[in-house]
Each structure stands twice: as structure tokens, then as C-alpha cells.
Image (cartoon, helix red, strand yellow):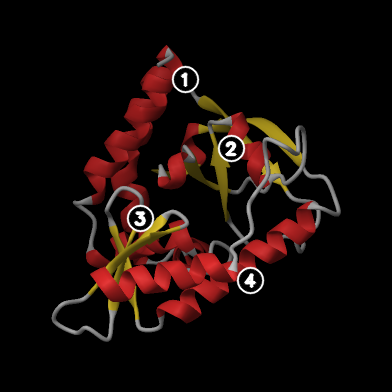
């Protein structure tokens, strides 16, 4: 492991430790960012309104920012993958995902750089059928980076966990969930086959870092006010 990677891991480790001190609502807003609704989800709306949840997160995360300043200085080098086929940035949007990994940024940029390295495999009907069968047999299945476990008290529901076994949310229709993910993958693949993306490298002020995540080993930094 490179010395710089130790810094990246420490950023996440500090944020993870701090996470447990947040209110239930603040925790849920951050969890939901990892899997859905980046643009208009609860966390984005909270920061655009500067509501009490945003103020809570901002105040508590200052301890992590202070530690980052000691190690990086006033800025941190981050990357953002821009998919040119995506819809324009919504007016008023405040929060954006950046990463300390240029390779991850290339993935989000689509076929920018080396398409072979950025290939995303589509979700097939057979893959979905196999996952549903496994869930029916065992009450548990891993599927494209997320884990689904039957809720024993209410078997009609399942609980969703991320790669790090952190609880995200629940659901009641697993096939529908997989089909939606299948449609999303198909859309992303179709876009990436049409227009190459690009990677932006930028020195981001530590003051603008909102939170640090590691979902999918993405080294993700939620950043305020930097669409690119």
C-alpha cells in the first residue's frame, strides 16, 4: 500500500467512526447517497436548504476536515468522471461526488481512456433468475455490490446492506429491484458506447468536503459546490 493510500483510508476511517455519533436521520441521508438519488435525494436537499440535518453533519465533520488539513494542507487532489451523455447539472444542485482514485473517475466517465478497462457487464435475465432462486433458498443473496437479507420478523421484506455490511434500507419486491438495476446498467452501457467521457482533476478546498465514503472501494468524497 502506498503512503498516500494510508491517508485516503484514514479519511474514511475517521468519517466512519464519526458516523455513529450522528442522528438517525443524518445517518440515513448519508447511507441513501451511496445507492440512489444523488441529484435530488435527502442529502442534496438538506444542503441546498441548509436545514438542521445539514448543519449537524457539517458541524460534526469539521473534526475530520481539521485532521485532513494537518495531512494535506488546505486542499486535496480529487478526480471526477464526467459522462458527456448525462443530463445537464440541475440548477441549484450543490453536492457532487469526487474521488481520490483516477481509475474510479475513469469508470464514471464511461469509455474515456481505455474502454477495455472501463467495461461494465450488463445484468442478464439469467443472472437475475439465479439471484432470486438463491434468495428463495437461503434468504440471502449478494447482487452487484449490495447484499439482500430476509427480514425474519417480517419475511415479506428484505434488508439491504452495502459491501461493508452497513445497513442501507429495506424493500419488498426483490425482482423489481433487480430489474430497475438492470435497466440502469443498460442505460449506462448504451450511453458509454456513444460518447466518450472525460476526467477532471482539481484541487478541492478541504472546507468544501462534506463526507467520505468507501462504497465499492470508490474512495468517494462528497463535495460541496464543484460540479467539475
Circle nearer the N terminus (2, 3): 2
Query: Marks 1 and 3: in contact by CB < 8 Å?
Result: no
Q: Residue furthest top?
A: 3
Quarter of the image for the C terminus: give it: top right
Instruction: Measuring from the top left, give residue 184's x and y in whole percent.
Output: 63, 67
Circle nearer the N terminus (1, 4): 1
The residue drawn where x is 44% and y is 68% is 130
Residue labelled with disc 3: 162
| Residue 62 appears in the figure | yes
Query: Marks 4 and 1: in contact by CB < 8 Å?
Result: no
Circle nearer the N terminus (3, 1): 1
Residue labelled with disc 4: 183
Q: Is residue 104 above or below residue 2?
A: below
Q: Which mark is residue 104?
A: 2
Quarter of the image for the N terminus: give it: top left
Separation of marks 2 and 3 at Cα, in angstroms: 18 Å
In the image: residue 136, left or right of residue 112: left
Q: Which mark is residue 73?
A: 1
Within 10 Å of disc 2 (Cα), the crowding (few <14, some 14-19, many 20+) is: many
SS of the residue under disc 2: helix
Amino acid at each position: 500500500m502506498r503512503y498516500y493510500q494510508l491517508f485516503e483510508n484514514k479519511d474514511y476511517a475517521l468519517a466512519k467512526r464519526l458516523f455513529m455519533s450522528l442522528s438517525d436521520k443524518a445517518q440515513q441521508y448519508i447511507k441513501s447517497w451511496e445507492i440512489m438519488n444523488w441529484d435530488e435525494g435527502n442529502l442534496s436537499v438538506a444542503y441546498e436548504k441548509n436545514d438542521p440535518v445539514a448543519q449537524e453533519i457539517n458541524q460534526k465533520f469539521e473534526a475530520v476536515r481539521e485532521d485532513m488539513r494537518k495531512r494535506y494542507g488546505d486542499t486535496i487532489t480529487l478526480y471526477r468522471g464526467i459522462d458527456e451523455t448525462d443530463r445537464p447539472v440541475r440548477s441549484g444542485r450543490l453536492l457532487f461526488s469526487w474521488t481520490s482514485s483516477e481509475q474510479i473517475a475513469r469508470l464514471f466517465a464511461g469509455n474515456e481512456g481505455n474502454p477495455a478497462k472501463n467495461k461494465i457487464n450488463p445484468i442478464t435475465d439469467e443472472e437475475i433468475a439465479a439471484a432470486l432462486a438463491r434468495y428463495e433458498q437461503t434468504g440471502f443473496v449478494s447482487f452487484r455490490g449490495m447484499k439482500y437479507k430476509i427480514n425474519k420478523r417480517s419475511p415479506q421484506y428484505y434488508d439491504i446492506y452495502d459491501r461493508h455490511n452497513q445497513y442501507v434500507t429495506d424493500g419488498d419486491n426483490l425482482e423489481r429491484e433487480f430489474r430497475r438495476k438492470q435497466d440502469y446498467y443498460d442505460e449506462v452501457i448504451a450511453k458509454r458506447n456513444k460518447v466518450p467521457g472525460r476526467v477532471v482533476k482539481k484541487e478541492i478546498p478541504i472546507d468544501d468536503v462534506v463526507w467520505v465514503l468507501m462504497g465499492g472501494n470508490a474512495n468517494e468524497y462528497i463535495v460541496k459546490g464543484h460540479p467539475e
